[in-house]
Amino acid sequence: MAKPKKNESAETREEREGSDLIEKLVGINRVAKVVKGGKRFAMAALVVIGDGKGRIGLGTGKAREVPEAIRKATDAAKRNMRRIPLREGRTLHHDVRGLYGAGKVVLRSAPAGTGIIAGGPMRAVFEALGVQDVVAKSVGTSNPHNMIKATFNALDQIVSPRAVAMRRGKKVSEILGRKPAEYAEKG
């Protein structure tokens, strides 16, 4: 993250940093708070933000008006950005399952040209993340909050072969099970 300049406002800094972010509004929900005089209605927004290169964030916001709820959710998503390792910048490194409440998701890496095969809220996550080829299935719930949080749980479990190799003190080729070039030539 770039160091802020002295005379730079927060809005200018945000424009410089966040101009390349992909913002996806996943859902808006009307919620009610029961008070002495009746009900107070508010709007709750669910937003996913990504840079299309492996960084993604999730945010929720609640306010009396829709634009304010979306702004709050967007700010929360920017604060909660995380990096997800991608294979060749287009798919996942391995298959993974995610859980959150009643939400269960299965994410599978796919060959080039497959596209994003995923239901509503999960599709928004993959588009913002920059994944081009993935097969995903939601089992258990269609609630957007639980589906997205289960998807984030699954994405947090993804580990790149490079990270596994570093942790084990081996080479990436040993982790992937590929033979080094000198052994392949000999037979």
Image (cartoon, helix red, strand yellow):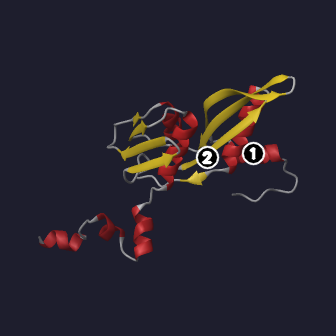
Residue displayed at 61% across by 46% down: 57
Query: Taking the image as drawn, is residue 128 in sight?
Result: no
Quarter of the rendering containing residue 119: top left
Q: Are marks 2 and 1 in contact (CB under 8 Å)?
A: no
Residue displayed at 40% across by 45% down: 107
Q: Position of residue 39 (x, y in %)?
A: 80, 24
Rendered-image quadrant of the C terminus: bottom left
Amino acid type, residue under disc 2 in the picture: Gly
- Compared across the picture, whether 48 is left or right of 39 comes to left
Which mark, residue 35?
A: none
- Compared across the picture, whether 36 is left or right of 158 comes to right
Tell me the crowding category of disc 2: few under 14, some 14 to 19, or many 20 or more residues within 10 angstroms, Cα based.
many
Q: Position of residue 101 (x, y in %)?
A: 53, 44
The answer for how far apart the CA atoms under marks 2 and 1 are is: 15 Å
Q: How many marks?
A: 2
Query: Taking the image as drawn, is residue 146 in sight?
Result: yes
User: In the rendered view, would you say 182 is above or below 1?
Assistant: below
In the displayed orientation, state which residue is furthest to the top: 38
Residue mark closest to the camera, 2 vs 1: 2
Under circle 2, the secondary element is strand
User: In the rendered view, would you say 161 is above or below 111?
Assistant: below
Label 2 vs 1, first from the N-terminus: 1
Under circle 1, the secondary element is helix
Residue displayed at 69% across by 57% down: 1
- Compared across the picture, whether 52 is left or right of 132 comes to right
Amino acid type, residue under disc 1 in the picture: Glu
Residue displayed at 31% across by 64% down: 176
Question: On the image, numbered disc 2 is attached to which residue?
Answer: 57
Question: On the image, numbered disc 1 is attached to which residue?
Answer: 14
User: In the rendered view, would you say 96 is above or below 25?
Assistant: below
